[in-house]
Amino acid sequence: MTNMKILKPTESELEILQILWNKGTATVREVHEELSKTKDSGYTTSLKLLQIMFEKGLVTRDDSNKTHIYEAAVSRQKTQKQFLDKMINTLFAGSSAQLVLQALGNQKASRDELNEIQKYLDNLKK
């Protein structure tokens, strides 16, 4: 088995991955329409980004029809973990507790979120 380097998506690639994670599959046009809701982006830019992401292995492409269908090749959970691990190591000196304290101090968590966090903490204590 070869040791493949895990490629970290850029910010623009993450935006596209979010669309694909939410939709499952999408054409370039569908991705472009979603991106256009929040930023000024050209169709050819969306196409080029998807082509680069395909070459990097971040997305798969079904080109059996005239219109190519793209799908995320990396999971949301694995990508979140990759970014979170890097953030903990670089910004919080390896302390996940410091990350959590900072996050909870800066954001208002809902009662449901706090209950979910409490359940997780209770399970860790067992």
Image (cartoon, rainbow, N blue to C red):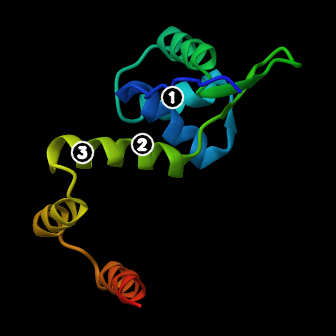
Residue 102 in percent (x, y) is at 13, 62
Q: Amino acid at mark 1?
A: Ile
| Direction from residue 74 to residue 36 in the image, left or right | left
Vertical arrangement, residue 40 with respect to residue 90, above or below: above
Which residue ends up furthest to the front in the rendered image? 1
Q: Are marks 2 and 1 in contact (CB under 8 Å)?
A: yes
Labelled disc at residue 82: 2
Closer-to-camera residue (86/117): 86
Position of 31 with respect to 112 (left or right) is right
Mark pair 2, 1: CA separation = 9 Å
Report the front residue among 113 and 122: 122
Q: Is residue 49 above or below residue 25?
A: above
Near mark 2 (Cα within 10 A), the count class, few <14, some 14-19 or many ≥20, is some
Pointer 1 residue: 6
Residue at disc 2, secondary structure:
helix
Is 82 on the left-hand or right-hand side of 48? left
| SS label for mark 3 | helix
Identify the residue at horizontal 54%, vertical 39% (top origin): 19
**Badge nearest the viewer, 3 or 2:** 3
